[in-house]
Amino acid sequence: EKNVDEGKRVEFKLDKVCELRFEVENNEEVELELKSGMAEIFGTELIQNKKYVFYSGGKIAVFTWHGCVLELSGKTEVAYIAKETPMVMYINTHAALEQMRVKAETDNTSGPTVMVVGPGDVGKSTVCKLLVNYAVRLGRRPTFVDLDVGQGQISIPGTIGSLSVERPADVEEGNFSLQAPLIYHFGHISPSVNINLYNCLVSQLADIVQMRGETNRKAAISGVVINTCGWVKGLGYKAVIHAAQAFEVDVIIVLDQERLHNDLKRDLPKFVKIVLQPKSGGVVERSRQHRVESRDAKVKEYFYGLSTPLYPHQYDVKFSDVTILKIGAPLLPDSLLPLGMKQEDAHLKLVAVPPSNQLLHHVLAVSMALTSDDDIVRSNVMGFICINGVDMEKKVLTILAPAPRPLPRSILLLSDVQFVDTH
Ligand code: ATP
């Protein structure tokens, strides 16, 4: 293990099937260069002699199939070469999925829908990224679905969504390029806050992803890779089962938890292939604090960009020009429910939110819905705004938006997620 210090360049020689793992120290940057050989980060190939910069808190593994020489400079928390990795197992999974795609091509059917499940911090997102990247590198166009409302990779926290992927993820930012992502607003960072709404949105997303497959042959053959939440107990487990059914998954990869593997085998039909795979020793457990920070970073990135800066707009909107809603009414005791109404209905009910100072710093989703006659709960969203100011006297909201005025739609959905815009 070496610690890389400021001003020094440290060289690492990797044998085949090894990886260099490093973490960027807080508020520091680390530069990486591939000097010779070939290497990849979570499935995206590196270009020789190009300098890649990683920022505060980044946890990276540079893997090589054939051996390589790497150079690091900047301040790392840790940096070491690992010889034991589950990468061979992961690439075998990829190979099996690719065979299913080839078969789908000849049989005129659909490629595999694979879901990655497991508790928190086992590398689910990373395995999804690997599988998607490897598929893309073979010329496929897989659909990536992220059902993780806490630490999702497609949009900001509090959402689920899908993306058709054409290019490997960006090495430095770790993201797939966002071309026409399909995003649904959930509004909370854990499915437990409104599990009925969560399951309803998962079903909706599954329907749309399936419909896209019907009109796009290439997407259908390429299949779907689904990332899930780390909540796998009780209702969380039920949500995993629900997602498996909604997306009609063919394969489930269970990371690191034998019990979950056994439970899924017991509860899902035999034609679903369920495999247990180890987690990588490199996956770093993230503290609560780290999770909070990475959620904030995700919202900041939405408005301000990362390595390519974005320039959001701030402007005023009259209270009377928008309709602010929240999904989910407070639950009443069963005895007080109107006749014929079920408790579930309340979970999906739209409630008007009168403008007030309580909206300050909240993120709001801009619904695609045009009028209140549309199915607002099941409509996808166009994007997000943040409330930077509320003037009760003038009756205006000051909002931060990714695009210049006017707001493209007037129905806004309140999220628990907050962002304090310090720019
Ligand atoms: P959660 O359920 O909490 O979202 P997860 O199971 O999806 O977590 P990941 O996000 O994939 O976990 O991984 C956790 C962290 O570990 C990430 O910061 C990722 O970059 C890092 N990581 C993953 N694999 C490795 C590795 N082999 N070496 C070093 N770091 C790694």
Image (cartoon, rainbow, N blue to C red):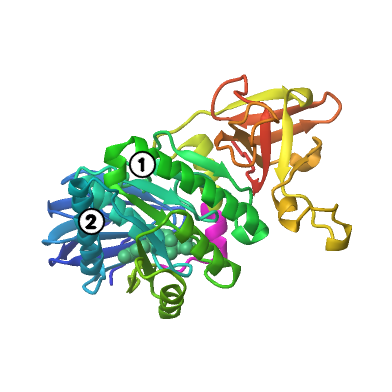
Read off the residue under disc 2.
100
User: Which quarter of the figure is the N terminus placed in?
Assistant: bottom left
Residue 286: say if magenta: yes
Q: Secondary structure at mark 2?
A: helix
Which span is picked out in magenta?
A: 284-294
Residue annotated with mark 1: 213
| Disc 1 CB within 8 Å of nearest ligand 1 atom | no
Q: Magenta segment, principal secondary structure?
A: helix
Residue 24 left/right relative to 391:
left
Residue 339 x, y percent position in the rendering: 84, 53
Q: How many marks?
A: 2
Tell me the distance, in whole angstroms, between the alpha carbons under discs 1 and 2: 16 Å
Q: Nearer the viewer, residue 339 or 388?
A: 339
Q: Residue at x 21, y 49 (%)?
A: 107
Residue 276, image x and y in percent?
A: 34, 74
Q: Mark 1 belongs to which amino acid? A: Gly
